[in-house]
Image: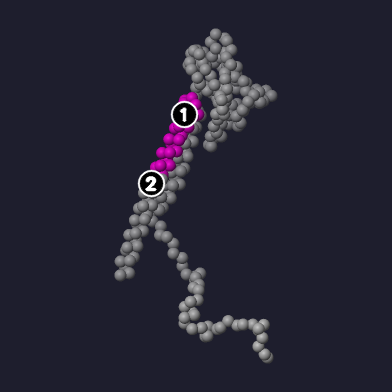
Amino acid sequence: MPHTDMEPQFAPTAAGLDESSIGDAPAFIDASAPRRHRPITKWSVLALIVMVSGTALTLGLDQAWLHTWSESGRKFPIGQRSTIQLPPGESLVWYESPYRVPVADVTLYMVDPNGDRITPAHPSGDISYTLMLGGMSGRALWKMNVPRAGTYEFTCFNHNFASDSQIPVEDRVVFLKTPDTLAEANLFRKFIQITGATASITLVIVFYVLHGLALRRLRLRAEAGET
């Protein structure tokens, strides 16, 4: 049969290849060959433990401080007439609840020691917090500016409910938190967060330096054994 250009071209067999062509052939990876893993030392394990436990400890201390601050102050039930001894000066009054903190439709009816009504102002912005553990939330709804110390009478009304009996018993109005503002409380939280992060990162770096030194010693021992 005469040869045509459409005739299939067959690749040369292995017997027809010279050594130079075999040497130029691409190398194939043996999938069955064992993979080399970076050695693990006690220092790398300690670094991982510090990273995880340091993060958890910092978060725990942060929330513990916020919970301690949320429990500070004088607490009173919603819808009940109460009295409180207030010092002169500015302070925030908080509405706290484990369910839902209202944004509006809450009234603080208050009279001074002379029986004159006081109308508390509202903060210029939203000042609120929520605990990750326990679910308690709070919002500063009023800003007091007490002219003189004395016993003040007040009642907090939540108009988001049809009747006071529907208001959760855990809801409360809180005076005289320590510190008074959330910004001051957050300053200590930032101190906890920065200190915890700095300590954890420093220890992780130290442990990884020791990990690198341990690997170097192992490598030198292996090279000395080969010679």
- Earlier-in-chain disc, 1 versus 2: 1
Is residue 132 at all visible to an observer of this figure? yes
By secondary structure, the bulk of the magenta-drawn segment is best described as helix
Seen at 59% across and 26% down, the residue is: 171
The kind of residue tagged 2 is: Leu
Furthest-right residue in this view: 162
Q: Which mark is residue 184?
A: 1
Is residue 172 at all visible to an observer of this figure? no
Identify the residue position indicated by label 2 in the image. Answer: 203
What percent of the width, then of the height, locates residue 27? 49, 73
- Does dot 1 land on a helix, a strand or a loop? helix
Seen at 43% across and 35% down, the residue is: 191
Cα separation between marks 1 and 2: 29 Å
The kind of residue tagged 1 is: Glu
Q: Residues within 10 Å of mark 2 (few under 14, many from 20)?
A: some
| Quadrant placement of the N terminus | bottom right
Which segment is the magenta one? Answer: 178-200
Asked if 125 appears above or below 28 in the picture, the reply is above
| Quadrant placement of the C terminus | bottom left
